Image (cartoon, coloured by chain):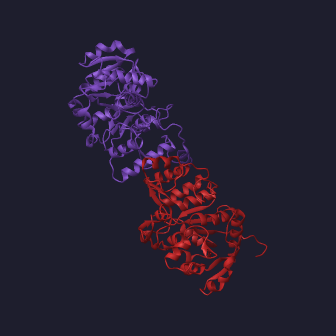
Chain colours: A red, B purple
Amino acid sequence: MGALAYWDWGGEPMRVTLLSGGVGGAKLALGLYTVLPPGSLTLIANTGDDLSLFGLRICPDLDTLAYTLSGRVSEQQGWGVQGDAYSALEVTRELGGTGWFNLGDKDLGLHLFRTEALRAGQGLTEVTRRIVEALNLNCTLLPMCDQPVPTHVLTDRGDLHFQEYLVRERTEPLVRGIRFRGVDRARPAPGIAEALEHSDLVILAPSNPLISIAPILSVPGMRELLRAGRGHRVAVTPLVGGRSLKGPTDTMMTQLGLNVSPVTVAELYGDVIQRFVLDEVDAALEPQITALGVSCSVLPTVMSDLAAKQLLARALLRLAV
Amino acid sequence: MGALAYWDWGGEPMRVTLLSGGVGGAKLALGLYTVLPPGSLTLIANTGDDLSLFGLRICPDLDTLAYTLSGRVSEQQGWGVQGDAYSALEVTRELGGTGWFNLGDKDLGLHLFRTEALRAGQGLTEVTRRIVEALNLNCTLLPMCDQPVPTHVLTDRGDLHFQEYLVRERTEPLVRGIRFRGVDRARPAPGIAEALEHSDLVILAPSNPLISIAPILSVPGMRELLRAGRGHRVAVTPLVGGRSLKGPTDTMMTQLGLNVSPVTVAELYGDVIQRFVLDEVDAALEPQITALGVSCSVLPTVMSDLAAKQLLARALLRLAV
């Protein structure tokens, strides 16, 4: 198929689904979004990071994906809206209210919209669809489920919501365990079964395996839908050279007694994936991956700019052909 | 007592309570606040205008009073925060959410604080006290009650929340009636009984009598507390020269079949007041007021600048001496 572009897949455009957390996953999402034909990308976002503040429903990973693909994201932060101000939160803090979670003014506008729609009885999937439409995005963005499944981190300072652990406590508490509260009652969001059934390629983003990808895989029925799909299932390593490029993946793995290695991540994903992508600097680990019965590819996975994101995206698309 | 300043009241500072709506009442509140000794002013605010948007509790009259006395108010508007931006609301509108009620970013910060505290189980009175303290205001600001009592306007276009009628529909529908929903279950907020008992002067602000003062007076027990207090009870006319200086008072009175006259307002207040203050341009109405068994004073009531606000405030304080 050498002469064919990667999206010429049996006469139909290639369909790709990405399971993703926030900042790290959004980089690959942008690479895929900008090289694939319009409409062929589905994103399934972790919503375990979601929180409720001031009665507002905040979905950091969904929003980071939407902001990134719509070009609104603060490139410096990787999350939030470019050039946003913090007037509202400054007043809230001044009055003595909760101020540890950064909420920009424009970002708040989206939370107001979502909260209003949820209160009116719409599901998170439907509300997200409306946001994607309003932002003129040519892709499908799905929460992992419509039910709240807050991720809690059990630490030496007690049971913390993941955002309390990450943002308020700056990952300082020692992690003893992780719980996805209420996940037993969750089910894959509307649209996920169809997306996975028809995807030619399913990618697990280089997001935190413990608190970004694991919540998605923990939704009852999700692993089965993944395994039943016809698409090639590939995970991209979140660890490069023995550490995570972004976020507390390495710290959390260490504190949970896990070996900080891509091999551990591949083991965690188990039979959900058929292939694992190592970074070039970790090429020596390839035999350990294949020993798990998982195919292995070695690629440049560090996405420092748009060209690097697109390069990785194209390389991943070729894996499915 | 000619040589004594108006606040030398039997050796104790004079205590004054103002029943008030938003913009118009806030003008007189500022006049009183800036001429009285610190701590001697109590404001009882209408909360019938309150609304819930995006799950946030918004209290326009309480906030207009707090913003005005703290010097934060947008002087051009008479409400909202000086120099505020509307970034959040612009995004909400862009996404297709409710955008008809103007919410500035800094203003939102206060609503976030209040909503969080209410959701934590604090009463509106307590939350308002915290706001007053954070803004370093040296007065007491009380909601008329802790219970929600939304004002609804029955119109030719149906039953509308007052803010829908005022802001969204720009007072265009014809008014057939007014209802204070749930007022039967309300009771005067904590602190009101004590304030009224010890006030030397109680003033009904030149606010809309139908939808700013009437809701306060409709709270069961409020009229009795007013009549039982030792203070002189004075209403300032909201009508000058046959029209309201601000807001739809005259329009609403006309549509409800009421004569648009200060005499009608004095009749509405009945035995709650002992004195009615006419504007100078309406001095000829004095006999009609006194015919109601109500004392009458004629004062310049148009508060175009701070000096005029203070002039009216001082004149009102002298009425109680």
Q: Quadrant of residue A10?
A: bottom right
Q: Visible in this render: residue A238?
A: no
Task: Name the side, left or right, on which A146 lies relative to A242.
Answer: left
Task: Name the side, left or right, on which A247 lies relative to B251.
Answer: right
On the image, the x and y values in percent for residue B56 come to 42, 48
On the image, the x and y values in percent for residue A138 come to 64, 58
Q: Residue furthest right?
A: A3
Residue plotted at (72% across, 71% down): A6
Q: How many marks?
A: 0
In this rendering, the answer to whether B136 lies above or below A298 is above
Task: Name the side, left or right, on which B295 lies relative to A288.
Answer: left
Quarter of the image for the C terminus of chain A: give it.
bottom right
Q: In this rendered view, identify the residue nearer to me: A57 or A201.
A: A57
Q: In this rendered view, identify the residue nearer to me: A146 or B188.
A: B188
On the image, the x and y values in percent for residue B13 come to 29, 30
Q: Residue furthest left?
A: B228
On the image, the x and y values in percent for residue A40 come to 65, 65
Task: Name the side, left or right, on which A176 lies relative to B83.
Answer: left
In this rendering, the answer to whether B309 lies above or below A8 is above
Q: Quadrant of residue A291?
A: bottom right
Quarter of the image for the N terminus of chain A: give it.
bottom right
In this rendering, the answer to whether B220 lies above or below A136 is above
Q: Visible in this render: residue B30?
A: yes
Q: Quadrant of residue B177?
A: top left
Q: In this rendered view, identify the residue nearer to me: A231 or A143.
A: A143
